[in-house]
Amino acid sequence: MKIGIIEGSIRKGRNSTAVAKWVYENAPQVEGVEYVYIDLASFDLPLFDHDGIPMMMGKQYPNPAVQAWSDAIDACDGYVFVTPEYNFSVPGAFKNAVDWLSPEWLDKSVACVGYGSEGAHRAVADWRGIMANFNVHVVRQQVGIPVFAAVVDGVVQADDFKKKNLADMFDQLIASVKQRRG
């Protein structure tokens, strides 16, 4: 089983690196589970402007950056979305990246770690609705990181409660992926 931990911001000076690194470094070591770090910013995706419908494109895209994104997402069985909250919702660049694809997401599982001034709970709620379009199971447990209080000098300062939430989130995600894979 391969779980992609997606750093979902492309903003310069982003806090996503600290949060995604914390998630990756604290992912539980489980036999048969591999974690892959996927940095959205490294793909340099264009705005979705294709005249084709992603569901009908057979995972073949005319833009090399989009094809690389497709290949990275398709290689995983489940994901952790490390998502900021921008203006009470999901970040545009991350939503654009999701919009470029379709069959790559189908019937998979997602967990969310949100960060922002209040922990990005609204962004996570929006991701639940967005990913429902792909029949994705977004696990119930989520982690909210209030960046102004919990990210110090580029490092997440997580208390025992946050660490337990993260462990529970991974347990739910791994169980969901196993169930969906049969």
Image (spheres, rainbow, N blue to C red):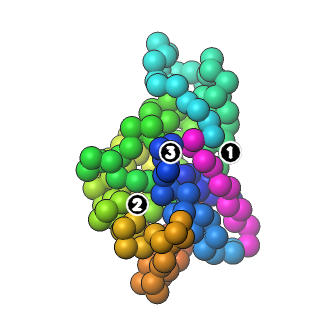
What residue occupies the far right of the structure in this picture? Answer: 32
Between marks 2 and 3 in the image, the one whose residue lies nearer the viewer:
3
Q: Can you give x and y, in whole percent of width and height, for residue 120 in the image?
A: 33, 59
**Which comes before the other along the chain, label 1 or label 3?**
3
Q: Quadrant of the N terminus?
A: bottom right
The residue that label 1 is drawn on is 75
Q: Is residue 23 magenta?
A: no
Give whichever of 52, 107 is nearer the camera.
52
| CB within 8 Å, label 1 to label 3 | no
**Which comes before the other along the chain, label 2 or label 3?**
3
Mark sitting on residue 114: 2
Residue drawn at the location 64% of the way across and 28% of the way down: 65
Residue drawn at the location 47% of the way across and 44% of the way down: 11
Q: CA distance from mark 2 to mark 1?
A: 23 Å
**Which comes before the other along the chain, label 2 or label 1?**
1
Q: Can you give x and y, in whole percent of width and height, for residue 177 in the image?
A: 57, 60
Q: Amino acid at mark 2?
A: Gly
Q: Compared to 130, does 1 lie above or below?
A: below
Q: Quadrant of residue 42?
A: top right
Mark sitting on residue 12: 3
What residue occupies the far top of the structure in this picture? Answer: 51
The answer to whether residue 108 of the structure is visible from this angle is yes
The answer to whether residue 176 of the structure is visible from this angle is no
Q: Compared to 116, does 107 lie above or below?
A: above
| Disc 2 secondary structure class | strand
| CB within 8 Å, label 2 to label 1 | no
Residue drawn at the location 56% of the way across and 57% of the way down: 17
Q: Quadrant of residue 119?
A: bottom left
Q: Is residue 34 magenta?
A: yes
Please provide the residue range marked out in magenta. 31-41
